[in-house]
Every structure is written in structure tokens, then in C-alpha cells.
Image (cartoon, helix red, strand yellow):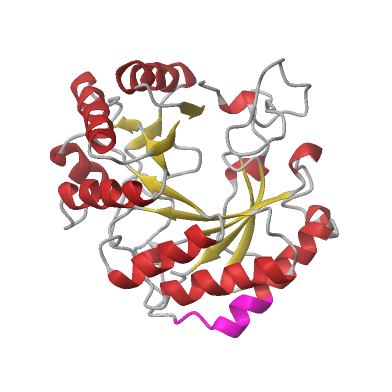
């Protein structure tokens, strides 16, 4: 089943049979002009240092982000990333007690509705004024953080103490560190608490991967890591496609991308969903621009036809 962003986030009554792939609530659709609450995803909120709430289109509500990289250090330098890395603030260590307090406070703000009285969140559609997940994301790759497994356990403990065992713990990751034992232990903690891993895959070939990610990490490492992780638990694949210098991804790149997905499955990896989306917030690089909804739908149709995998589209 393929669905567009508009079928997920609406205040309008959803069409019959539209089901959210992550949750049991009906799918919703948004008007053509997205409210700024969907496009403003700053990793800051009030006096918080490590926690930031956002209204997430892909999550279908409020996502409480955990930023383990406030120093903006990342092992990728993706051309579409909105983080400006020209000036780095210096190494920042995540204070566990402060992170725990900020998570509790962010949950309280959502539960009591205070979040939606702030200017940034005031126009949040009513069906999306609910907590959907706690997501490890931020200004860099979260699995590069030294105490990643400890942070996973902390978030699981906070969720349980708040009586929120029904919300997800989500890891949004470039999959570059999955081979590290400490990261594997963190993933196991997420598995034990019903977590979900969203692994990034934006290319089908090494050449295009390097154009997009601009990293010293070889593409094969990412593919191997995704495959091994998907053998242990089903993954969500998140793939961003864009224009580079006004050029959409070449057709042969999409064919190669589909082949990589098939290879993961053929090797025993499980993929529960492929998210196809484009640039929604201003990227750091001016030569990057978004694909149209029709172009994304065409890619998703090709993925589904070639691989048989379930896709969801987010213009």
C-alpha cells in the first residue's frame, strides 16, 4: 500500500480504507500548503539543551527528539542537510541527568497541552496534538555518541516511568556504526522495548552515494550494516531524493537503488516500509532542491513494482 503525505496528516476526514502503517489511527491528509509547524524542525526548544519537540509528518504527531550531537559533528556531510556546519560549537558531552529531566518535562508539555500554546506549535492540527514517539536524531549521527547504549536505556526507563509503553522509541540513523558492539547493544535495548530503526539509504551506487553523503565511509559498509541489522529485526528504510543542480536522480540510479533493496531482502534482511521523501526544509547547499510529489510517487511506484516492498510517500 502506497500513501502520500496528504493522506496522513489531515484535519479532513480520511478516505475509506486509509490506514497509517505505523499506528492504528486513521490516515489524515494535509492541505497543499503545509503549516510552518511541519517545516520548522529546529533542534532547540526553550532552555532545553538535548531535547526538542517537533510535529513529525512521518510519525503522525509530536515526536520528542533527542539530540546527541549538539556539537553538530557528524560522520556524513549530506548535501541536503539543514544543519550549518561552517561554525562548530566545540565538543559537547550529553549530561544524562539533564537529558532525563528534559525528557520528563517535554512529555509533560505535550500531555498537558502547554506545548500548543507556544507560537511555534499553535497551528498544529488537532489530530496531531499527541505524542507519537521519542526519536534519537539531531545535528549528527546519534550512534556515534560514546554512551549510545546508556542513552537508549535512559529513554526506555523514562518512557516506562511515564506510563508510555505504547509510544515508540525511534532511531533515525545513517547506519554507519551498526557494526560496533556498543551500538549493537543499544539496538538490542531498543528491540527489547518495541523500538523502531529508520535507516537511511539515499543511493544505489557508490558514486551517487558519495555525491549525496560526502563521507569517507564506503557505500558497501552502509549496505552491509543495513543488511545485518535487518536480519535481526525489520527496519524502516528512509530515502531522500532531490534535485542536484536542477537535475533529478538519473533513471539508472533508481534502478540500482531498487537492486540494493532487493539484495538486502535476498540476504535475509527484513524491510517493513520504504519511506520516499524529498527536501522539506531549507538545505545548507543552494544547489539542492525538492522533487515534486509526482516524481516521488513515480519513484515509489517503481520501488514497489521492482521489489514488492511497501512504500510511503512524503512530498
Q: Confirm whether residue 140 shows in the render.
A: no
Query: Visible in this render: residue 297?
Result: yes
In this rendering, the answer to whether 173 lies above or below 200 is below
Q: Residue 99 in the image: x percent, y percent?
A: 59, 76
In magenta, the rendered stretch is 93-101
Q: Quadrant of residue 107?
A: bottom right
Give the residue displayed 31% in from the left and 49% down from the top.
78
Say left or right for 186 vs 220: right
Q: Is residue 242 magenta?
A: no
Residue sitting nearer the eye, 31 or 106: 106
In the image, residue 152 sits, relative to residue 174, either above or below, namely below
Which residue is nearer to you in this view: 85 or 67? Answer: 67
Residue at 29% over, 35% down: 265
Residue 246 in percent (x, y) is at 31, 27
- Give the total number of marks visible in the rendering: 0
Asked where in the image residue 247 lies, by quadrant, the reply is: top left
Q: Position of residue 161 (x, y in %)?
A: 72, 71
Within the magenta stretch, is there residue 98? yes
The answer to which of 250 and 14 lies nearer the viewer is 14
In the displayed structure, 4 sits above or below 106; it is above
Residue 300: x %, y % from top left: 40, 22
Q: Is residue 15 left or right of residue 262?
A: right
Q: Residue at x 31, y 39 (%)?
A: 202
- Judged by its main secondary structure, the magenta piece is helix
Is 128 located above or below residue 103 in the figure? above
Q: Quadrant of residue 240?
A: top left
Amino acid at each position: 500500500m502506497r500513501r502520500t503525505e496528504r493522506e496522513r496528516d489531515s484535519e479532513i476526514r480520511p478516505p475509506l480504507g486509509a490506514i497509517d502503517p505505523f499506528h492504528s489511527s486513521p490516515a489524515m491528509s494535509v492541505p497543499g500548503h503545509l503549516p510552518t509547524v511541519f517545516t520548522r524542525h529546529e533542534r532547540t526548544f526553550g532552555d532545553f539543551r538535548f531535547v526538542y519537540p517537533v510535529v513529525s509528518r512521518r510519525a503522525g504527531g509530536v515526536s520528542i527528539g533527542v539530540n546527541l550531537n549538539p556539537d553538530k559533528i557528524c560522520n556524513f556531510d549530506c548535501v541536503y542537510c539543514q544543519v550549518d556546519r561552517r561554525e562548530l560549537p566545540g565538543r559537547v558531552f550529553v549530561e544524562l541527568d539533564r537529558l532525563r529531566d528534559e525528557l520528563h518535562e517535554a512529555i509533560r508539555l505535550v500531555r498537558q497541552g502547554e506545548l500548543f500554546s507556544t507560537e511555534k506549535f499553535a497551528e498544529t492540527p488537532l489530530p496531531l496534538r499527541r505524542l507519537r514517539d521519542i526519536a534519537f536524531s539531531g545535528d549528527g549521527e546519534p550512534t556515534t555518541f560514546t554512551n549510545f547504549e546508556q542513552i537508549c536505556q535512559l529513554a526506555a526507563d523514562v518512557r516506562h516511568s511515564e506510563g508510555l509503553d505504547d509510544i515508540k522509541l525511534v532511531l533515525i540513523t545513517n547506519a554507519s556504526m551498526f557494526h560496533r558492539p556498543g551500538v549493537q547493544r543499544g539496538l538490542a535495548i531498543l528491540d527489547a522495548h518495541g523500538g523502531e530503526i529508520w535507516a537511511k539509504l539515499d543511493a544505489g551506487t557508490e558514486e551517487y552515494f558519495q555525491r549525496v553523503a560526502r563521507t569517507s565511509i564506503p557505500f558497501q559498509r552502509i549496505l552491509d550494516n543495513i543488511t545485518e541489522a535487518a536480519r535481526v529485526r525489520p527496519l524502516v528504510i528512509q530515502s531522500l531524493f532531490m534535485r542536484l543542480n536542477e537535475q533529478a536522480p538519473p533513471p539508472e540510479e533508481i534502478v540500482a537503488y531498487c537492486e540494493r533493496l532487493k539484495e538486502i531482502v535476498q540476504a535475509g534482511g527484513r524491510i517493513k516500509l520504504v519511506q520516499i521523501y524529498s527536501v522539506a526544509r531549507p538545505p545548507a547547499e543552494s544547489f539542492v532542491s525538492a522533487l515534486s510529489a509526482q516524481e516521488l510517487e513515480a519513484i515509489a511506484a517503481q520501488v514497489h513494482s521492482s521489489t514488492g516492498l511497501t512504500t510511503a510517500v512524503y512530498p
